[in-house]
Image (cartoon, rainbow, N blue to C red):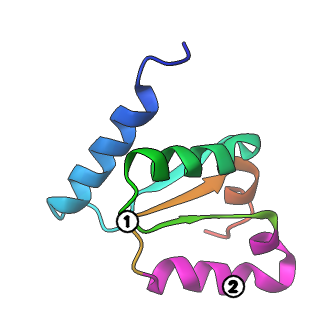
């Protein structure tokens, strides 16, 4: 259902968990086609938060390690990644 506040609720909960020290960097895995839109929603409701929204360029084979290093060492309040990109991160 569109417009019922699910995204805003999820974001608020993630930021509260970070504030309480229960998480370090909330990672939101969204459908790849909605990555940019989701990032825009975060900035609309939480303009002071430092958010990293991935792009296709982050997952070019030569840049994957750099991307993973960036999210590990960066001081982000949230990270948004597409589902197809998430599958490419080795665990």
Whether residue 22 is visible, yes or no, is no
The picture quadrant where one finds residue 11 is top left
Sequence-earlier tag: 1 or 2: 2
Q: Does the magenta stretch include residue 80?
A: no
Look at the image and tell me in which quarter the C terminus lies: bottom right
Identify the residue at horizontal 81%, vertical 72% (top origin): 57
Extreme residue in the left direction? 20
Q: Residue 79: percent from the left, percent from the top?
A: 51, 62
Bounds of the magenta segment: 57-74
Q: How crowded is mark 1: few (under 14 residues within 10 Å), some or many (20 or more)?
A: some
Q: What element carries label 2?
A: helix
* Residue at the limit of the structure toward the right, as seen here: 61
Q: Which residue is drawn at 48% across and 80% down?
A: 72
Is residue 70 shown above or below 24?
A: below
Asked if the stretch drawn in magenta spans residue 73, the answer is yes
Crowd class of label 2 (few under 14; some 14 to 19; many from 20; radius 10 Å): some
* Camera-side mark, 1 or 2: 1
- Per the picture, the main secondary structure of the magenta-coloured stretch is helix
The residue at 14%/59% (across/down) is 20
Q: Residue at x 28, y 43 (%)?
A: 13
Q: Residue 87 carries which label?
A: none
Left or right? Give the position of 5 relative to 68: left
Measured as percent of width and height from the top left, residue 38 is found at 58, 44
Give the label on residue 77, or none: 1
Is 83 or 52 nearer to us in this picture?
52
Residue at the disc numbered 2: 65
Taking 19 as reference, is 50 left or right? right
Q: Quadrant of residue 45?
A: top left
What is the quadrant of the N terminus in the image?
A: top right
Q: Is residue 3 visible?
A: yes
């Amino acid at each position: 259902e569109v417009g019922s506040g699910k995204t805003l609720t999820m974001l608020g909960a993630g930021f509260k968990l970070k504030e309480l020290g229960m998480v370090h960097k909330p990672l939101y895995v969204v459908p790849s086609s909605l990555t940019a839109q989701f990032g825009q929603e975060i900035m609309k409701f939480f303009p002071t938060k430092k958010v990293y929204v991935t792009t296709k360029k982050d997952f070019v084979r030569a840049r994957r390690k750099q991307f993973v290093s960036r999210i590990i060492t960066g001081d982000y309040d949230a990270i948004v990644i597409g589902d197809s990109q998430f599958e490419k991160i080795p665990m």
